[in-house]
Amino acid sequence: MDLERPLPQPITPEAKPYWEGLREQKLMLPRCRACRRAHFYPRVLCPHCHAADIEWFQASGRGKLHSFEIGYQTFNKAFKVKPPFVLAMIELEEGPRMMSNLIGIEPDPAKIRCDMPVDPKKIRCDMPVEVVFEKQTDEITLPLFRPAGGAR
Ligand SMILES: [Zn+2]
């Protein structure tokens, strides 16, 4: 799976609780009432069982680094993280995976704890991470992640 920039998406009705939560420094996740599984990104039907019965809950904000690559170009001038940066696939404690940036760490593959290199650009990791809320505009706050237990 390719890592993509976590650009703000147009705010669709089914994603509204997600963006509203971020503005209040909460990471909200959709969960299916039928099969009780959380998912991401927000959608109308549960990706696991296709039920249309979705509720929202506040995620812990904890997870682990699933894979990453180093980005050297800024794709969006509004984005406040300067290159080089770490594009990261975060596996949330609740199960869903989320594309984000890993901050609070040098963007150097050798400094990121990894156990099983698959290829030089995508390395499986299990480093514990936690969410940090980065306000971009009045509308948009993005969830970024940093190594768990980092200084606030
Ligand atoms: Zn379901």
Image (cartoon, helix red, strand yellow):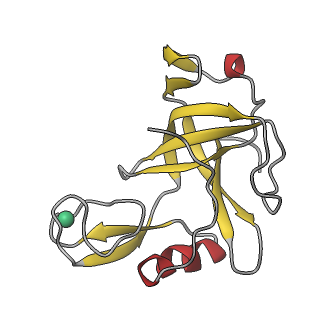
Between 28 and 150, the residue placed more toward the observer is: 28
Question: On the rendered structure, is 22 left or right of 71?
Answer: left
The answer to whether residue 5 shows anywhere in this view is yes
Task: Tell me where residue 64 appears, x and y as whole percent.
Answer: 50, 38
Question: On the rendered structure, is 56 left or right of 137?
Answer: left
The answer to whether 85 is drawn above or below residue 80 in the figure is: above
| Quadrant in the picture for the N terminus | top left
Which residue is pictured at 41% across the width and 48% down the height? 93
Q: Quadrant of ligand 1?
A: bottom left
Q: Quadrant of residue 128?
A: top right
Between 42 and 21, the residue placed more toward the observer is: 42
How many marks the image carries: the answer is 0
Task: Tell me where residue 84 appears, x and y as whole percent.
Answer: 80, 36
The answer to whether 150 is drawn above or below residue 109 in the figure is: below
Task: Tell me where residue 31 appears, x and y as whole percent.
Answer: 31, 68
Q: Quadrant of residue 32?
A: bottom left
The answer to whether residue 148 shows anywhere in this view is no
Question: On the rendered structure, is 119 left or right of 86?
Answer: left
